[in-house]
Image (cartoon, rainbow, N blue to C red):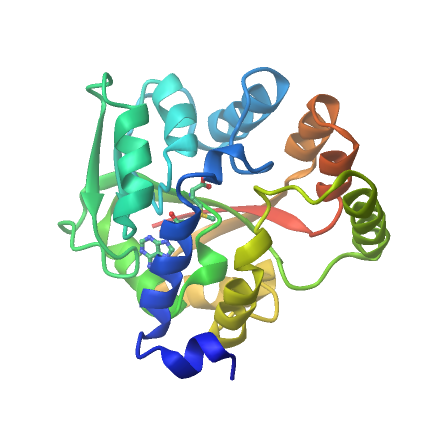
């Protein structure tokens, strides 16, 4: 048990909230979080278009964080409800989108969104599923709030087990860190807290699409499709410096979509 846990009477969810709140001010400066205009923005946008189509929809964006994915959804004309349980992350998102009437924000737990039954055309989230504390309950809830034939689309990955390429990439990143100084926006001082949280998560030893498929089916979802994150990673590499190009190789990611 780390000193942090020994001193804390917080539960896991509060630790997760505190971790993201501490990262809220610099989150948009960290590679892979902020979505820069240009090829990377276009690649993310294309994936959303391919999965959700062109028709504007009523979307619940779970764990919207600083509102980066919200920017994509808004650029496609969707009506967005951004939900997060970190007030600090939400504050950044609210400021970013203060002039946009197509988005509202709610402060809530994504595992228990407390939204009405059958109320959204789609649920979208990026980098939330790996950190769910009770994934089955969450999927049941998401199913409940979707309209009939509504769609769940999420982007996630295995953040615990580097790929074989990723192991080499990590060695090179450490070498670059030693030569150029570490990137202050990339976890840095909070890495111990992150490791402590990972240890206690159901998907803490690495999220793989195969793990969630039976849970999604249990919740009632159908037409489950997994697609590749490669087009986004390729676009990221065309815009990034060497250290960040290496980062795109470290972990395996996937895109999952399914229907109510
Ligand atoms: C890695 S960040 C991703 C933010 C955003 N989805 C993005 O991709 O830019 C994780 C976010 O999930 C939020 N989060 C984690 N667990 C949550 C939960 N149970 N309910 C609501 N928000 C949650 C955190 O507060 C944080 O904003």
Asked if residue 220 shows in the view, the reply is no
Q: Residue at x 72, y 43 (%)?
A: 247
Residue 16's quadrant in the figure? bottom left
- 180 vs 135, left or right, is right
Q: Position of residue 52 (x, y in %)?
A: 42, 31
Residue 148 to residue 112: above or below: above
Q: Residue at x 48, y 69 (%)?
A: 197
Instruction: In this rendered view, identify the residue nearer to me: 184 or 227.
Output: 184
Residue 198 to residue 37: above or below: below
- 81 vs 40, left or right, is left
Q: How many marks?
A: 0
Residue 245's quadrant in the figure? top right
Residue 220's quadrant in the figure? bottom left
Residue pushed farthest left? 116
Q: Position of residue 131 (x, y in %)?
A: 45, 61
Q: Residue at x 49, y 49 (%)?
A: 127
Asked if residue 234 shows in the view, the reply is yes
Q: Residue at x 42, y 58 (%)?
A: 19
Q: Position of residue 94 (x, y in %)?
A: 26, 31
Instruction: In this rendered view, identify the residue nearer to me: 214 or 241.
Output: 241
Residue 114 to residue 240: above or below: below
Q: Position of residue 162 (x, y in %)?
A: 74, 58
């Amino acid at each position: 048990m780390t000193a942090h846990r020994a001193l804390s009477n917080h539960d896991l969810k509060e630790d997760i909230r505190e971790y993201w709140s501490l990262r809220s001010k610099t989150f948009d400066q960290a590679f892979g979080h902020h979505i820069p205009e240009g090829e990377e923005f276009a690649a993310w946008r294309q994936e959303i278009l391919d999965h959700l189509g062109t028709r504007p929809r009523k979307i619940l964006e779970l764990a919207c964080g600083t509102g980066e994915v919200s920017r994509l959804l808004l650029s496609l004309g969707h009506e967005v409800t951004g939900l997060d349980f970190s007030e600090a992350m939400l504050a950044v998102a609210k400021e970013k989108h203060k002039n946009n009437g197509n988005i509202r924000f709610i402060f809530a737990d994504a595992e228990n969104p407390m939204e009405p039954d059958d109320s959204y055309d789609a649920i979208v989230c990026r980098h939330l599923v790996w950190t769910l504390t009770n994934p089955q309950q969450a999927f049941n809830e998401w199913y409940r709030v979707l309209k009939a034939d509504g769609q769940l689309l999420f982007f996630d990955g295995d953040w615990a087990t580097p790929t074989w390429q990723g192991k080499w990439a990590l060695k090179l990143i450490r070498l670059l860190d030693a030569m150029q100084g570490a990137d202050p926006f990339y976890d840095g001082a909070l890495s111990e807290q992150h490791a402590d949280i990972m240890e206690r998560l159901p998907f803490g030893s690495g999220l793989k699409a195969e793990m969630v498929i039976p849970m999604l089916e249990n919740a009632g979802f159908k037409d489950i499709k997994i697609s590749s994150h490669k087009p986004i990673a390729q676009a990221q590499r065309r815009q990034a410096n060497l250290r960040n190009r290496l980062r795109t190789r470290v972990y395996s990611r996937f895109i999952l979509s399914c229907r109510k």
